Amino acid sequence: MSEHFDELETRSIEARERDLFTRLPGYLQSAKTSVAGWGERFADIDCLSITSRGALASIPVLRKPELMQAQKNSPPFGGFANPSMLDGSRLFMSPGPVWEPQAPGLDPWMAARSYYAAGIRKGDLVHNALSYHMTPGGFILDEGARALGARIFPGGIGNTEMQVEAAAFIKPDAYAGTPDYLKTILDKADEMGRDLSSIKRGVVSGGALFPSMRDEYRSRGVNVMQAYATADLGVIAYESAFEEAVLPGMVCNENLIVEIVRPGTNDPVSAGEVGELVVTNFNEAYPLIRFGTGDLSAILDEPSPCGRTNMRIKGWMGRADQRTKIKGMFVDPKQVDEVVKACPSIRAARLVVARQGGTDVMTFQFTAEQRDVDLTDIAAKLTMICKLKGEVEQVSSLPNDGLVIEDQRDYSK
């Protein structure tokens, strides 16, 4: 059986670049004429002249705050989707909020390759424990597995005991979901005396797979690999293996143009230099051209031993802004500000993110004039606005360092 999903993964670097930049000018011109937002943005750009990475770099990066403002002005997609291609599709709301459409066709978020690289094959049964509620995460992994020919149990999140009972009964071959929740399910199975040893592989996304967590899963007989995905673009890159060892970094997905730019600018940086990950897709229904993810990464400038020839990146290395992923959900500094404004007694605040017992935890720290502040009320507003539960702690002072969200997680362990 082939170690690669198709021949695209092993073509020469020159052939891939030639293919991408032959298709790009017509794609840009189509977006300009068919999608109002791109028509306005490309008014002074000769799309047919964009035939190289250097020419592509002349197009300004579209960053998420700009997209969010456009969506506010022209709901739901800000004029950046092609409405003629969205009949019969789903639309999703991610934290921010940011609205995303589901493009038509098989595997619209391009997740199948990440499953294949993780050793999952046609006929395998995947227990998908990523949320299907409001955000596209569950559907991203669902559609990718089905495109591969695997079968899916749509477990979603929560109801852990029921998920354990289901998995013990149907005996899935693989797990898909956030890195943390696999441990939750396995621990609950041990507590309940249920056998989940059928799960041998995993594809995880929506959070960091810490080395210690990967080692724990391996000790429990589960080989887990990461897919780096966003709600807007789908799977951007994924881990691969060679001779059973998971390789450093991630292989970029096919049919994407990936760049690393200096944060806050439009300028690509050299291989190895950390910068913001910027992606151009070829999605006619939802064109994203030089879309700034807000995530930091760097290019690994050597070929992968697995035989895949596409660009490799180091993976997720933090945020170019302070927007932070917690338990698979992004929390934006603007949401922290909303909590502050909803609680008149608060003078200043920050959200502190840490790890506790292998799980993400967040603490809303705040200062106030009085001591008898209703912590329960603040916690309820925090959950309502951020869609995540957290601790609330009143402190005497906060550092004057400009941080609204402080990420204390150590990504090296």
Image: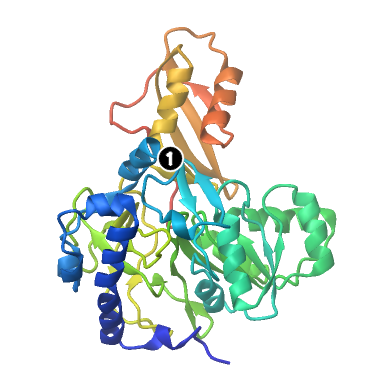
Tell me if residue 48 can be seen.
yes
Residue shown at 47% from the left, 51% from the top? 100
In the image, 66 versus 403, the foreground residue is 66
Residue 154, x across and y down, in percent: 70, 59
Compared with 6, 178 (above or below) is above
129 with respect to 42 (left or right) = right
Picture quarter containing residue 372? top right
Compared with 48, 66 (above or below) is above
Residue 91, x across and y down, in percent: 53, 50
Q: Quadrant of the N terminus?
A: bottom right
Compared with 325, 49 (above or below) is below
253 with respect to 41 (left or right) = right
Residue shown at 19% from the left, 51% from the top? 265
Q: Secondary structure at mark 1?
A: loop
Residue shown at 32% from the left, 51% from the top? 36
Residue 313, x across and y down, in percent: 34, 68
148 with respect to 399 (left or right) = right
Tell me if residue 307 can be seen.
no
- Mark 1 surroundings: few (<14), some (14-19) or many (≥20) residues within 10 A: few
In the image, 240 versus 11, the foreground residue is 11
Number of on-image labels? 1
Residue 112, x across and y down, in percent: 54, 73
Q: What amino acid type is highlighted by mark number 1?
A: Pro
Circle 1 sits on which residue? 75
In the image, 83 versus 394, the foreground residue is 83
Residue shown at 36% from the left, 24% from the top? 398
157 with respect to 363 (left or right) = right
The colouring scheme, among rainbow, by chain, secondary structure or one colour, is rainbow
